[in-house]
Image (cartoon, rainbow, N blue to C red):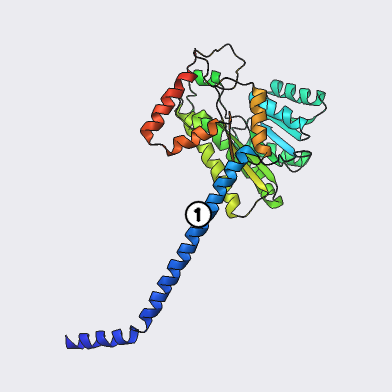
Amino acid sequence: MSKYWVSFEFLRKVLNPVFPCNMLLRGYSLCVLMVDVVWVLVNATYAVIKAVHEVFKPPPMKSVDNEKAMVIGSGRGIGRDLAIQLSYLGATVICVDINEINNSKTVAYIKRKGGDAFMYTCDITKKENVDDLAQKVKTELGFVSMLFYCCGIPSPRSLLMAPNEDIHGTLDLTLTSYFWLIDNFLPEMKARNHGHIVALTSVAGLSYIKDQMPLCVAQFAVQGLAESLMEDLRINKINGVHVTLTHIYPFIVEDNSEFNLKISSYFGTITPAKAASSVLEGVLRNYPETSVPKHFLFLGHVLRILPRKATVLVRDLLDTGVDFA
């Protein structure tokens, strides 16, 4: 026993000079932590002040003149109006849709108004089709600098219809095909440090819609995809490629159908053209997140921080405004 005690005393005497060094290192680590905390608080405060300032004085809009913008789902609805308005702003619009007749009408209208547009017919739910489309566009038109994906946005009509029994079909249209498009076009955007990807989601990505679980899951996933893209670009210090996540509330956008709202929306309705204009405003200002209508973005943020019971109550209240006949 005494042998072990002697050994312990010997080690304590040898290591004793090291103890002050350990205290100094801990003190240094604490100082570094305090500096980091102060730095985060200062920058977070600045970010909040800047965000409030931008509410009253938004950043200037960028030019899309001579940009090549691909609009997936340009045959109807918001996608059609996005394509048309992009052409008005001087962009070369690449119109992609599975419906050749509707898509040709969009392209014809753009050309009739003096714009520059090209038509491609594609079923994007199949990977080989997306790969072929990307290769063809790159060969014929070159670098695609803007990507708008409008296929996954449900209309009020689609929310009333029976859900798609093919879960894979819903996910492929709304989410998986987006991955395929990004895989084909994002690498060149990164290489050039120039580009813009616009992720459009609906209210189904913020709250569950009755009997539409696959759609809601896919819409939630699109938000995760957009936020992951933002982080990927930030971590890799690519500041010339932007991502904009836009929440579309279908019951706000007028639908050209015979369906009418049982109770008119408390918030009014807007035309697809005005919805597209609102989307483009957020894109041209490089906002990371927007909504249509604009004031609903704040509501979405509030719902994320409220207790679940309070969130459910708010959602039930708003649900009376989206009750369809």
Residue 39 appears at what percent x and percent y? 52, 58
Q: Which residue is mark 1?
A: 41
Label 1 packing within 10 angstroms: few (<14), some (14-19), many (20+):
few
Q: Secondary structure at mark 1?
A: helix
Residue 299 appears at what percent x and percent y? 50, 32
Residue drawn at x 70%, y 35% is 70
- Asked whether residue 165 is in view, the answer is yes
Residue drawn at x 42%, y 74% is 25
Describe residue 209's horizontal placement relative to residue 237 as left or right: left
Residue drawn at x 55%, y 26% is 249
Say above or below: 7 vs 106. below
Say above or below: 259 vs 75. above
Q: Tell me the amino acid under the disc marked 1.
A: Leu
Q: How many marks?
A: 1
- Asked whether residue 97 is in view, the answer is no
Residue drawn at x 50%, y 29% is 204
Q: Nearer the viewer, residue 56 or 289?
A: 56
Quarter location, residue 181 = top right
Say above or below: 274 vs 190. above
Say above or below: 38 vs 296. below
Describe residue 15's horizontal placement relative to residue 74 as left or right: left
Q: Nearer the viewer, residue 251 or 218?
A: 251
Describe residue 112's horizontal placement relative to residue 252 as left or right: right
Residue 230 appears at what percent x and percent y? 58, 46
The quadrant of the rendering that contains the N terminus is bottom left
Q: Nearer the viewer, residue 119 or 92?
A: 92
Q: Residue furthest left?
A: 1
Residue 165 appears at what percent x and percent y? 47, 24
Quarter location, residue 258 = top right
